[in-house]
Image (spheres, grey):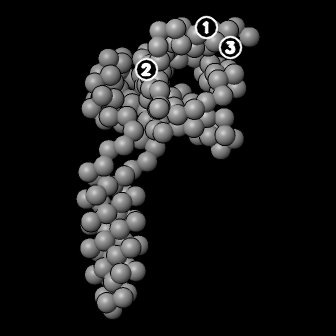
Amino acid sequence: MSNLFVIAYDDVRTATEVRDKLFQMMKEHLIQLEDAAVVERREDGKIKLHQASNPVAMGATGGALWGTLIGMLFFVPFLGAAVGAAAGAAGGSAVDTGVNDDFMRELGRNLRPGAAALFLLVQQATEDRVVPEIAQYGGQLVKTSLSETDEQHLREAVKAARSQ
């Protein structure tokens, strides 16, 4: 089971840096993320989602590849690629994995203009290695799916990491 964490930052640059740092830590097997997205509230008040993956593009790419292969069997690879890409894009747009986009937009409206929030679905993490690395960027824990006791423990760990 994954846990949700929402951390607010003063700007989109910092939130993106933290997300990139977490991706680096994934390569080191210190954290396992199911989803990571940055939500920005622009100065004009509009909400922009910066998602790590684009399911429509991934579906279209995969569909084009499979369509080409199947099309080659019937001697129409270009038609197969076009049909496969369209089907893959349609399938990708129907699939919304990770944190719900509407939920992210709703919380994003509570940010002050110019600020951003990092939404994380964490499957597993080495807390004593991840928390100090992330705490140095500042930010404020806005929402979590942890129990009250676990959330308090996390807040204390972040406070201790920042004071070092």
Q: Are marks 3 and 1 in contact (CB under 8 Å)?
A: no
Amino acid type, mark 1: Glu
Q: Amino acid at mark 3?
A: Ala
Q: Is residue 161 depicted above or below 122 in this figure?
A: above
The part of the image, by quadrant, that contains residue 45 is: top left
Left/right placement of residue 93 relative to residue 10 reads left
Q: Residue furthest right?
A: 164
Query: What secondary structure is found at the residue carrying circle 3?
Result: helix
**Which quarter of the rendered picture does the C terminus lie within?**
top right
- The image shows residue 82, relative to residue 111, as above or below, that is below
Relative image position of residue 34 (x, y in whole percent) = 48, 39
Please state if 59 lies on the left or on the right of 157 as rendered.
left
Query: Looking at the image, is mark 2 or mark 1 earlier in the sequence?
Result: 2
Q: Residue at x 25, y 59 (%)?
A: 90
- Can residue 16 be seen? no
Graded by Cα atoms within 10 Å as few (under 14), some (14 to 19) or many (20 or more), the crowding at tag 2 reads: few
Amino acid type, callout 2:
Ser
Q: Which residue is mark 1?
A: 156
Could you tell me which residue is drawn at 67 percent across and 9 percent down?
Answer: 160
Give the number of the disc on residue 90: none
* 10 Å crowding of disc 3: few (<14), some (14-19), many (20+): some
Give SS at disc 2.
Answer: loop
Residue that carries the numbered disc 2 in the rendered image: 145
